[in-house]
Image (cartoon, rainbow, N blue to C red):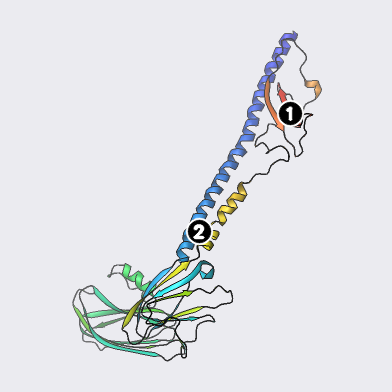
């Protein structure tokens, strides 16, 4: 009778032990897997962010540009990225270059008058254009006398809008143009007047969007405002093809670089290129990697290494529930767990490190 009872108790104890053991395994492994997955996503996001920052900062700090300016035109050159990312700017072209550290001079210089009359011939679905860089306050007057066919006259008030229009089919809508006129054979000449409300490239397009040959006479007069540069000597005169200007590092500096084309030339190509400060680019791009490095550091337990990532815990029971002694009784060890608190107890041997406590589960009982 005692043997049968002990066998039954032992069997039921094994079943409860297996169930609890399986339950404990799920409760400790799932949070660990979730945490690992979350850390993996965070690590990936920081690396991707560092790459994106490096690419964006490299592009911004090393910007290059090129423009065609007519004789007498002048414009300000902007430094993109600021002095923290840009070391200097190089300017190439037949132009006078001025460098001011206390802001740009006012647009009160002597206006430049540009006049021109010429004939245009437009094939079917063809177009021609004139482009000018006009500072704020400049005036544009155009007269178009159509002698054959018809022409749409479009005015684009920025280089970007004109470039976007060029990238599309010539038969597409002219909705990107800020102003549009129509002139045809047999009608009085079209007179167009416009005042520049900001400094930018202004483009007049003569577009033959019709399936017949076209001819017209174009006359324009431009009154261009200029910077007041009287008494100012160029930092780089026009007879020096290349010019390199250091970007001001002072936070209080209001640097202004002006390019002016001499009036004795029809037009010229001017190109600019910024030299990067690589140490600043790399420092900013490395910020996500520094955050990732700090995030991955793990706290350690004083005197005994790192804290175990998983532990098995049990609920204490009373001494009365321990099974009775039986010669046929075989204990089943289902789990062990070592506990490492902040302070670790050491054995008598100085070379031996012993955990403060060790729990052993026998037949589902600690």
- Quarter of the image containing the C terminus? top right
Residue 149 horizontal/vertical position (percent) = 20, 80
Helix, strand or loop at label 2? It is helix
Q: CA distance from mark 1 to mark 2?
A: 50 Å
Helix, strand or loop at label 1? It is strand
Residue 51 horizontal/vertical position (percent) = 49, 55
Residue 239 horizontal/vertical position (percent) = 37, 82
* Residue drawn at the location 29% of the way across and 67% of the way down: 169
Position of 4 relative to 147 (above/below): above
User: Dividing the picture into quarters, in which one does residue 317 lie?
Assistant: top right
Residue 213 horizontal/vertical position (percent) = 18, 77
Asked if residue 305 lies left or right of residue 232, the reply is right
For the question of whether residue 80 can be seen, the reply is no
Q: Label 2: which residue? A: 53
Circle 2 residues within 10 Å: few <14, some 14–19, many ≥20: some
Q: Are marks 1 and 2 in contact (CB under 8 Å)?
A: no
Asked if residue 259 lies left or right of residue 154, the reply is right
Position of 226 relative to 275 (above/below): below
* Residue drawn at the location 52% of the way across and 51% of the way down: 47
Q: Label 1: which residue? A: 358
Q: Nearer the viewer, residue 67 or 123?
A: 67
């Amino acid at each position: 009778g005692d043997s049968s009872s002990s066998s039954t108790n032992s069997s039921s104890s094994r079943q409860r032990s297996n169930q609890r053991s399986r339950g404990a395994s799920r409760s400790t492994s799932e949070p660990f897997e979730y945490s690992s997955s979350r850390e993996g996503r965070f690590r990936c996001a920081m690396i991707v962010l560092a790459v994106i920052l490096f690419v964006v900062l490299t592009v911004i700090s090393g910007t290059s540009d090129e423009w065609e300016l007519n004789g007498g035109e002048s414009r300000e050159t902007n430094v993109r990225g600021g002095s923290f990312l840009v070391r200097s700017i190089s300017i190439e072209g037949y132009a006078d270059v001025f460098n001011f550290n206390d802001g740009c001079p006012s647009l009160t210089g002597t206006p430049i008058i540009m006049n021109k009359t010429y004939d245009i011939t437009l094939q079917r679905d063809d177009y021609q254009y004139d482009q000018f860089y006009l500072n704020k306050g400049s005036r544009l007057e155009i007269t178009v006398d159509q002698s054959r066919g018809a022409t749409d006259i479009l005015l684009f008030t920025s280089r970007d809008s004109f470039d976007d229009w060029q990238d599309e089919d010539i038969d597409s809508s002219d909705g990107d143009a800020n102003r549009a006129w129509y002139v045809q054979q047999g009608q009085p000449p079209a007179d167009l007047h416009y005042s520049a409300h900001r400094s930018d490239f202004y483009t007049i397009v003569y577009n033959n969007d019709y399936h017949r040959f076209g001819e017209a006479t174009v006359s324009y007069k431009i009154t261009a405002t200029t910077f007041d540069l009287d008494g100012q000597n160029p930092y780089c005169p026009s007879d020096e093809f290349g010019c390199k200007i250091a970007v001001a590092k002072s936070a209080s500096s209001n640097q202004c670089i002006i390019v002016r084309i001499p009036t004795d030339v029809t037009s010229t190509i001017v190109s600019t290129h910024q030299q990067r400060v690589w140490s600043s680019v790399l420092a900013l791009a490395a910020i996500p990697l520094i955050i990732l490095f700090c995030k991955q550091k793990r706290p350690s337990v004083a005197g005994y290494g790192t804290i175990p990532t998983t532990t098995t815990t049990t609920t204490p029971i009373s001494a009365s529930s321990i099974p009775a002694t039986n010669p046929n009784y075989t204990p089943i060890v289902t789990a062990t767990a070592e506990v490492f608190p902040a302070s670790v107890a050491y054995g008598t041997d100085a070379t031996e490190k012993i955990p403060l406590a060790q729990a052993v589960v026998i037949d589902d009982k600690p």
